[in-house]
Amino acid sequence: MDLLLQHVINAVSLGGTYALLSLGLAIVFSIIGLINFAHGELMTAAGYTIFFMLAAGVSLPLAIVFAIVAVAILAMGIERVAFRPMRKADMTGLLITSFAMSMILQAFFQNAIGARPRAVAMPEALSGVVNLGSVHLGIIPLMSISITVVALVALNLFLKHTVMGITMRAAAEDIDVVRLLGLKAGRVVATSFAVSGVLAATAAFLWVAQRGSVDPLMGFVPVLKAFVATIVGGLGSLTGAVAGGMLLGIVEVLAQVVLPPSMVEFRDAFVLGFVILLLLVRPQGLLPAPTGRRS
Amino acid sequence: MAEAAPLKGEKPEIGRQAAAGEGLAAPRSLERARTFRDAAALAALVLAGAGLVYFLLPGGPRIATMFLIYLTAVLSLSIYSGNSGITSFGHAAFLGLGAYVSAILTMQPAVQASALPHLPEFLKGWALTYWPALVAVIGAGVVVGLVTGAPLSRLNGGAAAISTLALLIIVHVILVGARDFTRGSQTFYGVPRLTTPVVVAVVAIAAVFVARWFRDSATGVKLRATRDNEVAAEALGIKASRVRYGGWILSVVVGMAAGSLYGHFLGAFSPKDFYFSFTYLLVAMLIVGGFFSVTGAVVGTALIFAVVQILRQAEGQSSFLGLFPLPPLFGLTEVGLGLALMLTIWRRPLGLAGLSELSLPWGASRLAPARTRSVAPAAAPGTAGDRLEISGLSCRFGGLKAVDDVSFSVRPGEILGLIGPNGAGKTTLVNLICGQIAGQAGAVVLNGKTVSGLHPAARADAGLARTFQNIRLFERMTVLENITAAALLRTGSLGAAREKAIALASEFNLLDIADRIAGTLPYGSRRRLEIARALATEPKYLLLDEPAAGMNPAETEALTEEIKAIRDRYGLGLIVIEHDIPLIMRVSDRIVVINRGAKIAEGDPATVRNDPAVIEAYIGSRNSH
């Protein structure tokens, strides 16, 4: 029983991190049709910011806030430099551009900081365990779930109740109409990158807290997974991204638990095989984004 | 518009074809010979380049060999991605599979026993030479292609690209996990170095020919049609999943052959050699050179390969020209590739080579219509009861009834006008009839055969063709290829399809621009091309969705005559959807009016014009306020 509960907590906590990342991807995609591979490097940048802040003796909450702000600015900078000139490119072109950006940033981290992983000194308190009767629950997974919930609620409030949020939702359906209405499309795009940066930095903190180190390639694998989750949920659909992220987390933990030990190393193959099968049944994903296109 | 005096008219008209047949030629084999000659020219260029490097550069043999291996790999990627438009991130993995299969089959028994002690019996001790091993690799490639392509070919766009990425990871995980066969993530050593200059040259040149041949083959033309516009391709009878499957299998086979070359060149490798950075390199080569042509694949491979060689040198340098020391640099290659990619996408999105293949000058008469015979099916009279019967079609979007229980029918040789105010549901109705969307109720019966419920391609095969309100051409193919892709529905032979396409192009006054890329045509030609293309499928019934949209009065006038001429010449039933009421009144034998999804009137033009319900729908009721 308590084992089951632990698995559930792990699944939700992992799924929550994926959900934050895939939301960041989805929010940018919904507006300019870009699947941003460099999202992983935003995560890495946040990881390094937290590492350096902690090393400089800054308290953890302040380090997180600083990382969030820094990465939001970095995301807007990348948009300005790499993606704004490419507005005319198609979806594949944008995807490849972001792939290139990702490689360039990885090379930058390797040269500027070094290829070796750096251990991040997380406060002692985080490594503890909460005891509820016979059940032992790690603080990190619990914190991870609460932070995910807070981030999702905050994003929801932002999108529903602020002018910029509502404009962004309109832009997701048709950015040209937003332009015609005289709203500043450029600012909408920049904001979407900033929001994706905030989400990436939040996810980076959860990831680093779980693993205790940063390295130049840190963001690559989780964002790859988030990328898969976005597609599973339905490209450009925000609810779909959250659902896809959660589902992927659950399937991964489930595969870990259910597969016989000799097969565990094939886990990712099974998970991705499942994704391909799912796409066969629902090529547009689980909860596709609404579009108003005519034939 | 008498056909007896076809040269008098100044306007483009469709009676011209009879007079345009002075030149013979364009026998079928000529086209194939042309492809072959162009492929040979490209291959000669590749050989010459590699040969120069081989003999002139220090370390030339090694560099030339690597170039040809990369070229084979990029060509395999080009066969699928270039023709289908779906970027594959999975090809590096197939190269890996090819390398491992070939390596296991060619290893010396003693080495094999120490490196792979747990190898299953049936794989032990073959110690083949390269060519027999290549045959086995090709066989394995067919199997891998069949298995992976089965799900993949049914997907398109983003879902397909992500699935290839998933395949890359899946194959990688399997290679790492299958320790008995691959030594897992450890280095796989003792692979005989069988990639001699002759071997690599033969395989690479063969790959150039295969890629070039495939691009201009029947499947290749259809695959490119689905790449440029899948909806239109399916409406013309092309089953997208089938042609994608074919392209994928061939591509995987060539990829695995490239992998076998690479494995025997390296001599020792591990699964990570066939993972993301390799994928990145291959994709960069194809995109920079030009995604859409074999020539582009060659150009891109050569250029990026040269850049990478130079950057790798620089990465190894410990000082700048021996003057001052440099810190060791990581990933200079990746940065260089990244910049090259971004520059390409920014400045030349079609890549350096663009859309066209390297082609040698060729005799001018090749586009003369083969014979003067009409393309029209010899006016097959059909049986008396033939007709396209639409009954009770309904379609709801949420709570909106876009089409509500609409029934009518068309006979061969009849022109039915379908009109209605904006948003009446006309286009939805066409989409329902031709299968682009599925409705909730009703049937479409074509000459006694129920076609509703069938795939759009199957409906085209049954004899339905259509044009689209916002023209859907295969924008990155030539005018002639556009028509040929459609003509392939009725003939398996590419030569016959091209002959028919040439005749149709001539009939629709498109022959002069037959080699132009469709995306560059002016509006009027685009409309004519779309109609010519639809006719190439030899339809029994043709639906024209707003053919006069955006035309001026003179063009509309010409169109009226063209529509009638099509009916007379081909004896088919036409449904014309239009906003232009005068056009509809002049051209139609009968008119169906729909409003808010429902049929409100049907009859000959005069009756419909005076029908109160129709007047109300268009102008509004006098009593309503």
Image (cartoon, coloured by chain):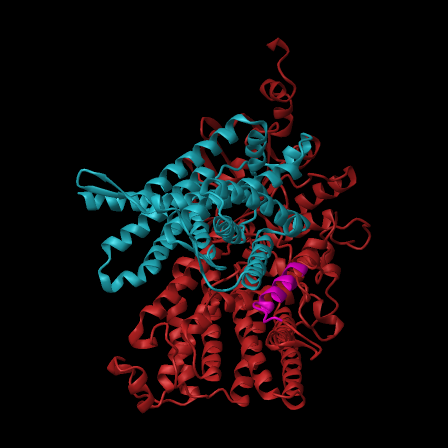
Chain colours: A cyan, B red
Q: Number of numbered discs present?
A: 0
Q: Looking at the image, is B111 positioned above or below residue B535?
A: below
The reply to whether the magenta stretch includes residue B334 is yes
- Residue B393 is inside the magenta segment: no
Residue in front for this viewpoint, B463 or B482: B482
Depth order, front residue of B271/A16 = A16
Quadrant holding the N terminus of chain A: top left
Seen in the picture, residue B52 relative to A225 is either above or below; the reply is below
The residue located at (60%, 29%) in the rendering is B420
Residue B411 makes an appearance in the image? no
Question: Residue B45: x, y in percent?
Answer: 67, 81
Report the residue at 51% width, 67% height from top: B277
Residues B236 and B267: in front is: B267
Residue B484 vs A86, above or below: the answer is: below
Q: Which residues make up the magenta segment?
A: B327-343
Question: Horizontal and vertical percent for residue A72?
Answer: 56, 43
In the image, taking residue B252 as reference, residue B603 lies left or right, namely right
Which corner quadrant of the image does residue B58 belong to? bottom right
Please give the name of the residue rendered at 66% of the width and 51% of the height, measured from the top-left corner: A81
| Residue B79 coordinates in the image, percent (x, y) | 54, 68
Measured as percent of width and height from the top left, residue B481 is found at 63, 61
Does residue B500 appear left or right of residue B249 in this picture? right
Q: In this view, does B528 lie above or below B359?
A: above
Residue B316 vs residue B217, the one in the foreground: B316
Which quarter of the picture shows residue B57? bottom right
- In this orientation, does residue B622 appear? yes
Q: In which quarter of the image is the C terminus of chain A?
A: top right
Overall secondary structure of the magenta stretch?
A: helix
